[in-house]
Image (tube, rainbow, N blue to C red):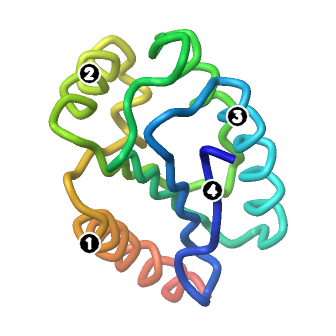
Amino acid sequence: MAILAAWDNDEKTIIRHDFDAAWSWDEFWELVRLNSAMVESVSPKDVDIIVNLGKSMTPRGGLTMSNLRKARLSALPNQGIVVVVATPFMKALLSVFISFDPEMSEKLFIVETLEEARRMISERRSPRISEATATL
């Protein structure tokens, strides 16, 4: 498979998707189904997603706004943010798409390295953990 999904941490709060250079939308939609099962398996825990496009080119069939919007709408209630690790080309391309969908920009962030993605999630997760503890 051109896209792999795995837990990125032992706490099962981050799922990482690693994309090969060549992938298709059919493979992506299979990943969405797998991702949903993984997120539901730890419900009600919030799960953030790292999409590692570091080796990826655009999918066969091209990158389309309708597919990106459909992916956003498939998110489960306990899915947190999505941090995309992207090449400069993919980053520029995704930024254009995000600018057309304000809701996408609230939950989708683009960085250049896997370490940056993990750091961003950690920084954003810290306030959520503090808020959850305060309500107990």
Q: On the rendered structure, is 19 left or right of 70?
A: left
Q: On the rendered structure, is 112 left or right of 70?
A: left
- The span from disc 4 to disc 3 (Cα, nearest Å) is 10 Å
The amino acid type, in three-letter code, at marker 3 is Glu
On the image, the x and y values in percent for residue 123 come to 28, 73
Q: Do the residues labelled 3 and 2 touch (CB within 8 Å)?
A: no
Q: Which of marks 4 and 2 is nearer the N terminus?
A: 4
Q: Which of marks 1 and 4 is nearer the N terminus?
A: 4
Secondary structure of residue under mark 2: helix
- Give above or below for 90 relative to 121: above
Secondary structure of residue under mark 4: strand
Q: Are marks 4 and 2 in contact (CB under 8 Å)?
A: no
- The span from disc 3 to disc 2 (Cα, nearest Å) is 20 Å
Q: What mark, if any, has residue 93 been given in the picture?
A: 2
The residue labelled by disc 1 is 115
Secondary structure of residue under mark 1: helix
Mark 4 closeness class: few <14, some 14–19, many ≥20 residues within 10 Å: some
- The span from disc 1 to disc 2 (Cα, nearest Å) is 21 Å
- Give above or below for 28 relative to 15: above
The amino acid type, in three-letter code, at marker 1 is Glu
The residue labelled by disc 3 is 27
On the image, the x and y values in percent for residue 70 come to 63, 21
The residue lying toward the viewer, choosing from 106 and 134, is 106
Q: Earlier in the sequence, mark 1 or mark 3?
A: 3
- Give above or below for 84 relative to 126: above
Q: Do the residues labelled 1 and 3 touch (CB within 8 Å)?
A: no
The amino acid type, in three-letter code, at marker 4 is Leu
Q: Which of marks 4 and 3 is nearer the N terminus?
A: 4
Q: Earlier in the sequence, mark 3 or mark 2?
A: 3
Give the quadrant of the C terminus: bottom right
